[in-house]
Amino acid sequence: MRMHDEITAYWDDLRHTLAAMPLPLVSQTAELLLACHRRGGTIFVLGNGGSAATASHFACDLAKGTRADGVAAFRVFPLTDNMPLVTAWANDVSYERVFAEQLGALVRPGDVAVLISGSGNSPNVLAAARTARSAGALTIAWTGATGGKLARLAEVVVRVPSPSIEQVEDAHLMLAHSVCVALRARLRALGFDSAARPRRRAMPRAISELVATEAAYDDVSAEAAQ
């Protein structure tokens, strides 16, 4: 077979894979990430190999590519990017714990963990899923056709219906891009709506209490100086 034929066959297979994607679950993923954004939660993203690259790419796009005037940015943290910390946990404990240990120190109830694994069986991804669930965070899995063990640990599972790991990884990146594009449109609409109805922004309670405390301290200091 000629190289052109190989490439054409790959693209044909990829088109069939994309046509069979579970789009309602992709939309649900976007809605759950938006809900996390609205409650001020953090989104954690992780994966191995090509999935690690997708996790970093997705975190970049989610943090920067969805920005809209008048709307807070997404709080998103890729657990793949701090290589000194990844190698420290791998060397001192085990590679199985490189994500779970990071997540355990940061994750809070109401946060979201996006777990990317073509096989769905990577031990370190499974460990991270368990850590996220025990902390009260929502788990979303992007996997290959079977879902692997990860499918039993995640609340939402988006399976790419293909036996080809390359096409699974292609589809995961398209998942990331499509979700970010949809979220950007929603945030921009929210920003436009806020601009059309201007109102005074309330000071966060913790900050307002701090300001009041400092003002009271200044009053007492002034009286003492008289």
Image (cartoon, rainbow, N blue to C red):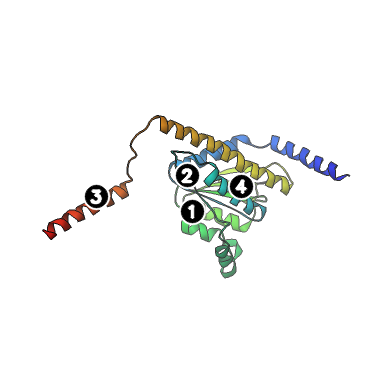
Q: Secondary structure at mark 4?
A: helix
> Spatial distance from mark 1 to mark 3, Cα to Cα?
38 Å
The residue identified by callout 1 is: 134
> Spatial distance from mark 3 to mark 2, Cα to Cα?
28 Å
The residue drawn where x is 52% and y is 61% is 101
- Percent x, y of residue 111: 47, 48
The residue identified by callout 3 is: 212
Q: Which kind of residue does numbered mark 1 sit on?
A: Ser
Crowd around label 3: few <14 · some 14–19 · many ≥20 (10 Å): few
Q: Which kind of residue does numbered mark 4 sit on?
A: Ala
Q: Which kind of residue does numbered mark 2 sit on?
A: Ala
The answer to whether the residue labelled 1 contacts the one labelled 2, judged by CB atoms less than 8 Å apart, is no
Q: Secondary structure at mark 1?
A: helix
Q: Residue furthest right?
A: 1
Q: Is residue 19 shown left or right of residue 225?
A: right
Foreground: disc 1 or disc 3: 3
Q: Which kind of residue does numbered mark 3 sit on?
A: Ala
> Spatial distance from mark 1 to mark 4, Cα to Cα?
16 Å
Q: Is residue 225 shown left or right of residue 131?
A: left
Sequence order check: which comes first, mark 4 or mark 2? 2
